[in-house]
Image (cartoon, rainbow, N blue to C red):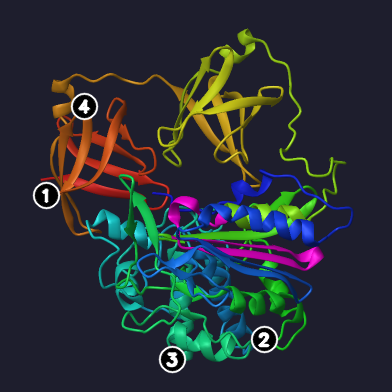
Amino acid sequence: MNLNFIYLSLLILLPIIGNTQVEFNSKIEQKMDSLFLEYQGEAGAAAVVVHKGKVLYQKGFGLANLENNIPITPQTVFETGAVAMHVTATAILLLENEGKLSLDDPIQKHLTTFPKYKKGEVTIRHCFHHSSGLRDYLDLIKMTGRSQHMTFDNKAAHELLQKQKELTIVPGSDYRYSHSNYLVLALIVEQISGQSIADFAKEKIFTPLGMNNTFYYQDREKVIKNRALLYAKENEEIKLKQNYYFTACGDGRLYSTAEDMAKWMANFSSSKIGGDKKFMEKLFTRGILNNGEEMSYALGLEYADVNGHNVLGHSGWFGGATAMILHTPEEELSVIAMGNNKDKGAIGKAVRMNRMMLIDKTTAVKKDKTETTISKVKMSKKVKNKFCGSYFSYAIGYARKIYMKEGDLFFHDGEHEDALLQPIGKNEFRKMSGNNRITVKFGEENNEKAMYLRYGQRPPMTLLEFQPVNLTAEELNRFTGKYHSEELDVIYDLKIEDKKLSVFLGEKQIVQYDPLMEDLFNSAHDGYLQFEKNKNGTIRKFTINDYSLGRMSFFKK
């Protein structure tokens, strides 16, 4: 259930051009325009580039409303999803400036109904860096059988989160992306200020910057002029993917225009809000784990090394909306693209635009080169074959398979298209499609074959080899029946369908799991179920072990 989904993986897709650190001219402008040609007659996007406070590029492409053929302009209002996180962080920093909180305050100081956690104290700083271990409230909604197309606001999110007694990790021990972190920060803003996050941000951030068409979506009856409706394809047919009812925000549900976002990005240089030239730079502060290791995640922004440049970025999506903000502090360069076409998202557009303006500081590259060169390492089939196998992590619930085809190794995750693994060193490979910031290295842990999976600059995750099981129908039926969770206050009915274990809540199927090992079932992105037996061998409970939810027990009725 990792919704994380920070698409900085795209940051190494394309090369750069130019002979200076930042360059913009008519040729680059034409190249940027060409990125958006596919939106003609379709839902599209708006984009803006700001350099040292000056707008270099600001355009709209495609249609904001397909029914009425309304074009997208720099004044079109888009939803930006999790791009909102660094704006919520700014609201917290303003309260810190006023002496109304400390970043090391435990969240219970301001949200007094939240429980104290056995694994440790959660602070505001932990929430900033996604190291709190708070369960993701969006996944909690899913696991209680509800849809996001329902009336759900910050009050409802508060009530849901205060019931959660366990954390996914020891606070500060690891990065664990959760939308709850920034929802909690918004709740703290509301508690301290006595205003909604929408009203606070309007008064303290948007109005002072002249961002008159930017707001947090907390009023589902609000009339939004120039709104881009959201679209996605289902069974080859374009469908409207607008969500009018879900108003919980802080982690998302920020609306803005290209014109307004240009003012916001100019503020990165001017720090017009905060009263200090260095105020906005606080957003760029990396988190520090308990072991002293520096994190790649800052405050609602994540670092990536792009050809020698430290680039911060964050993506967002919700329904049919996609957005990406990128900022290079040393160059004072900011790029954002926002779209209403889920299938032709704006995220990659922002990445490519950013690339067009940054020179490669690490290697000399030919002008207009279109692909990143990865040094090829020769490796025999015999060596490659040693790495084939199935690997699993109990810590995060990831199962991955490595197999050989026509002399090459491939990476299978059960969710995306299998990806070629290109050797880049001894026992080390890079995933060559999809998220190609992923590297894979092989080794041993306690005499067991191990695979070390790394995403960008984050610490590697360890997966150990295992032998998959092939359970009979009779063996599978042992796991069926009704199970109750006190924390979620739901009863799940487990059934077998097509040799998979299906989880039902009433008549609604929540998720399916594949048999992986004896008494363990796994899903590509919904964690795993592990069953426990009584002394007589009958099953007494199962535990959901999930990246976004941690461990949750269900007892058989």
Would you name the residue on which mark 3 appears? 194
Looking at the image, tell me whether mark 3 or mark 4 is earlier in sequence order.
3
Between marks 2 and 3 in the image, the one whose residue lies nearer the viewer = 2
Would you name the residue on which mark 2 appears? 273
- Give the SS element for disc 4: loop
Looking at the image, tell me whether mark 2 or mark 1 is earlier in sequence order.
2
Identify the disc placed on residue 507: 1
- Give the SS element for disc 1: loop
Relative to 467, 4 lies left or right: right
Q: Quadrant of residue 273?
A: bottom right
Looking at the image, tell me whether mark 2 or mark 3 is earlier in sequence order.
3
Task: Please state the extent of the stretch shown in magenta in the rendering.
Answer: 321-347
Q: Quadrant of residue 211?
A: bottom right
The residue carrying pointer 2 sits among few (fewer than 14), some (14 to 19) or many (20 or more) residues within 10 Å by Cα, namely some
Would you name the residue on which mark 4 appears? 499
- Give the alpha-carbon distance from disc 2 to disc 1, as whole Å: 51 Å
